[in-house]
Image (cartoon, rainbow, N blue to C red):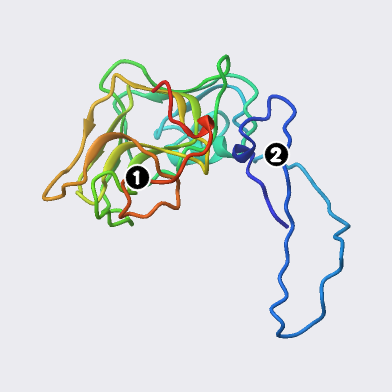
Amino acid sequence: TKKIPPALLTNCAGPVTFRLILSWKNDDNSGSNPPAAVDNISLVSQAPARPVSFGTFTIDNTLANAGTNFTTFTEAITNLNVSCITGQVVFNVTAGQTFTEVIPPLLASGLAGMPIIFQKAGVGANPIVQRTDAGSLTTSTFGGQGDAVITIEGSDYVTFDGIDVSTSDQGIEYGYFLRKKADDGCKNVTIKNATITMTKGTSAYVAGIYSSNHDASTSVGSATGITITTTNGRNENL
């Protein structure tokens, strides 16, 4: 069984063509050659447990993690990444709250009339997403692959409005980190009304916002990233 995340299909608001490539290998250790054809393939669509396809949701760590409320950014983004975006998605993040977590990359994309928005809600200080760990990647050049508080990977039409980020260890290189999903760049991404507090220490590789030419597999020692062969791979309108 192989699950294909909806985020890899870009969006599910309309028909999508997706090529499946099936391969096999005979290492000559045992067995016989595989058949010339593959059959009995079954494709089944499966909705996420808490779909985030459209509508308004909250991120509030004082309420139950149920219904339209998520207690962490991790929960919200995990569900968003496996949902088919069919309309505008808004996350109202409660003012004054702090979220200490290691968030998975945002992979989902909106469209021109169906953006994905994370925004401060209520009166008070901006909500803060913070990392207190040292990260898992050891960057060896400025602009190399690194750890981040919020990673936006190949996503389009995304806004973070009034969402502060902070770190307490120089091992986290980036506050907001934009990178590509294979050859798909980030487009129409807005980060505004936010305070970014990084811990530089003795590191020469720390930056608040970094729009990179990396994908998830780029080396920590490469500042140039991957080779882009189409205009779809460019980061644009940031």
Mark 2 closeness class: few <14, some 14–19, many ≥20 residues within 10 Å: few
Q: Quadrant of residue 16?
A: top right
Q: Residues within 10 Å of mark 1 (few under 14, many from 20)?
A: some
Q: Residue furthest left?
A: 202
Q: Amino acid at mark 2?
A: Ala
User: As drawn, is 78 to the left or to the right of 53?
Assistant: left
Q: Quadrant of the N terminus?
A: bottom right
N-terminal-most mark, 1 or 2: 2
163 relative to 33 in the view: left or right: left
Task: Find residue 55 and report its horizontal and vertical position in percent.
Answer: 58, 20
From this view, report whether residue 34 is shown above or below residue 224. Answer: below
Image coordinates for residue 119, horizontal then vertical, percent: 40, 21
* Residue beneath disc 1: 224
Q: In terms of depth relative to the viewer, which is nearer, 112 or 182? A: 182
Which residue is more in the foreground, 204 or 129?
Answer: 204
Q: Which residue corresponds to mark 2?
A: 47
Residue 185 drawn above or below residue 126? below
Is 163 drawn above or below residue 183 in the view shown?
A: above
Question: Judging from the image, what secondary structure is the residue with disc 1 in?
Answer: loop
Q: Is residue 68 left or right of 217 when viewed as pictured? A: right
The type of residue carrying mark 1 is: Thr
**Residue at 73% over, 44% down:** 19
Real-space Cα distance between discs 1 and 2?
38 Å
Towards the viewer: 1 or 98? 1
Mark seen at residue 54: none
Q: Residue at x 33, y 43 (%)?
A: 148
Estimate the x, y position of residue 173 in percent, counting from the top left: 26, 45
